[in-house]
Image: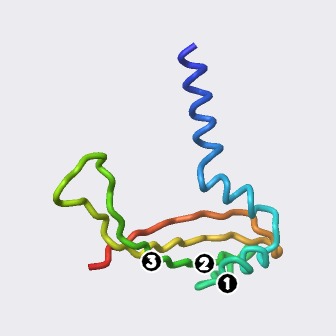
Amino acid sequence: MRVLLFIVAVVIMVSCSSQRNLQKTYIGKPLSSLESELGKPQTVFNKESENIYIFEKIEMLKSTEISQHKLTLDPMVTPKVKKTSRYTVTVVDEVITKIELEEQYDRNN
């Protein structure tokens, strides 16, 4: 019974990940559907049978107070960060065949 519960939990975690949702949304669709959301690609690599496009989306995340559910004199505050989302897209015949997301956070001082 525990093994079955473990397998179900793993399947749910894998199917609900942001990477999986990204793949469900864009694989099999034309590159123009992604360009309409992210704009022009930053870099393009041309290979023999496929092209690799790299898109970047940069967001500035504000600092916010962390709730501790108690009264304190010194509140905890998260720092401001710059979030860079890098999408690596593999395209064959103008159709997206593979997409990967990499997120990087840089603290602003």
Q: Position of residue 39 (x, y in %)?
A: 67, 84
Q: Nearer the viewer, mark 3 or mark 2?
A: 3
Give the mark nearest the N terminus, 3 or 2.
2
Q: Secondary structure at mark 1?
A: loop
In the displayed structure image, the side of residue 17 where residue 103 appears, left or right: left
Marker disc for residue 60: 3
Q: Name the kind of residue labelled 2 in the image.
A: Phe
Q: Are marks 3 and 2 in contact (CB under 8 Å)?
A: no
Q: Closest to the observer: 29 or 82? A: 82
Q: Position of residue 77 (x, y in %)?
A: 28, 64
* Mark 2 Cα-neighbour bin, 10 Å: few <14, some 14–19, many ≥20: some
Q: Quadrant of residue 63?
A: bottom left
* Mark 3 Cα-neighbour bin, 10 Å: few <14, some 14–19, many ≥20: some
Q: Residue at x 52, y 71 (%)?
A: 85
Marker disc for residue 55: 2
Q: Secondary structure at mark 2?
A: strand
Q: Residue at x 19, y 53 (%)?
A: 72
Q: Work out how far the residue at label 1 is from the one at label 3, CA to CA, in angstroms.
A: 18 Å
Q: Work out how far the residue at label 3 is from the one at label 2, CA to CA, in angstroms.
A: 17 Å
Q: Position of residue 5 (x, y in %)?
A: 58, 22
Q: Residue at x 30, y 69 (%)?
A: 79
Give the mark nearest the N terminus, 1 or 2.
1
Marker disc for residue 39: 1
Q: Are marks 1 and 2 in contact (CB under 8 Å)?
A: yes
In the picture, which quadrant includes the C terminus?
bottom left
Q: Residue at x 60, y 55 (%)?
A: 18
Q: Are marks 1 and 3 in contact (CB under 8 Å)?
A: no
Q: Name the kind of residue labelled 3 in the image.
A: Met
In the displayed structure image, the side of residue 54 where residue 79 appears, left or right: left
Q: Name the kind of residue labelled 1 in the image.
A: Gly
